[in-house]
Image: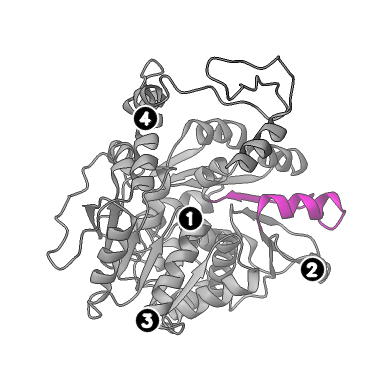
Amino acid sequence: MSLSFEDFKLNRQILNAVADAGYTLPTPIQEKAIMPILSGQDIMGIAQTGTGKTAAFVLPMLMKLKYAQGNDARSLIIAPTRELAMQIEQNVRTFAKYTDLRTVVLYGGLGPKTQIAELKKGVDIIISTPGRFLDLYLAGNINTQYLKFLVMDEADKMMDMGFIGSIHRILEVVPRKRQNLLFSATMSDLVHKISGDFLKHPTVIEVAAQATPAETVSQVLYKVPNLKTKLNLLQHLLKDTEDFTRLIIFCKTKTVADNIFHFLERRYGAEQVRVIHANKGQNTRINSINAFKDGDIRILVATDVASRGLDVTDVSHVVNFDVPIIIEDYVHRIGRTGRALQTGDAITFCSPSEEYYVQKIEKLIRQQIPVIEIPDGVFIDDTPYEERQDIAREIDLQKRRDDPEFKGAFHEKKAKNSKGAKPAVKAGATAKVRNNKPGGVRKRKSVKFDAVHKKDKKKK
């Protein structure tokens, strides 16, 4: 028999807010986590994205805090990105709407003056990225002595982003006597290490096998020979406006994201598509995400900055234009669809040089991604010479990564082409200048390379 939110003995203010938010039954992570948190246990929660884990720690935390008290925070939630911090704050405000609990969200990318002013008004719950929290703490703007809760969300992403040093510094400045909650989609070695420093005899809650995509997400893979064909395939899929109602297109670099955005903007107009990545200003990113959530735009192009912390319940499709190099990000990317028990589709475009990462992803998620043929209506372009070279170079690098003894076809080809070639003369080096007479060699003379180059040009 499944539990209801009433069974958790939450107070009426919280239950009314839960009902207003449209929640009827708790998700598995909520069923397993809420009662242990209410009883004061440390928790390690392993749950894939989109399973409702934010509410799993926010609801019992609000119940234990109850009402506003003093000026200093009693709860600190650490998140890896500003987008996720903002999403958590939105959840906290939703569930705390009938209480007087005060929330402040802290993140970089804009001046701290407004955030400091908010802190000075009094705060119960701080949601922050690690860097901004430490900056404001070291400047004397945050008092940690009253903290009762410390929550680390998306711990695996925190480790991927190199925050382990910042986390250890935060652990040094918060009270020893506190309740700790750690949530992660995967259990990497670094997450395991930080959990040992962070948690005391934790209750481990795992609602799905580690790094398992949500069952509500249907996954497919297209093997695509080159970039131009990827664009042709994307354009072909987007013709289906009935199925592809709201989609996120993930790219591995800012440059690719901008190029895809301009490509789509020319075809569908600026009112249909937006792009977000680390080079975009904070307000631009917030406005783009809100426009996407509100249904004002159909397509959001993003780098992995948005693979976590983007909570939109009716994303019909996620398209991996590039296969992620950090393989754990695959789970988080495709978790942007199929949220809150709805269904969704995840489509991945894979070039020959990306098959290496697909194999690693399949090993991580312990399942094969079904491969389907490129549709007949898609024109398959020839791969340009430079792109072929880049692909060959990348495949050789991958093979050498797995086997340091591997020489590689690209390496041999390069050696063969260079056989018999004259060695290049470095700038500033000395050179012998030959006489034009048959068999004659002028008296040796040291000359600069640049001078020789100029002389040769004049002869031509």
Pick whichever of labels 1 and 2 is earlier in the sequence: 2
Q: Verify CB contact (< 8 Å) between mark 2 and mark 3.
A: no
Q: How far apart are marks 1 and 2 (CA)?
A: 34 Å
Query: Under tag 3, what secondary structure?
Result: helix
Which residue corresponds to mark 2?
A: 122
Q: Nearer the viewer, mark 3 or mark 4?
A: 4
- The amino acid type found where label 3 is placed reads Tyr
Measured as percent of width and height from the top left, residue 324 is found at 40, 48
Give the residue type at disc 1: Asp
Q: How many C-alpha atoms fall within 10 Å of the one at disc 1: few (<14), some, or many (≥20)?
A: many
Q: What stretch is highlighted in magenta?
A: 128-153
Q: Look at the image and tell me in which quarter the N terminus lies.
A: bottom left
Q: Tell me which corner region of the image, top left, top right, bottom left or bottom right, holds residue 217.
A: bottom left
**Up-down relation of residue 99 to residue 132 (above or below):** below
Spatial CA distance of label 1 from label 3 is 23 Å
The residue to which callout 4 is attached is 396
Q: In this view, does 98 lie above or below 419?
A: below
Q: Where is residue 11 in the image (x, y as percent from the top left)?
A: 53, 70
In this orientation, which residue lies closer to the viewer: 408 or 296? 408
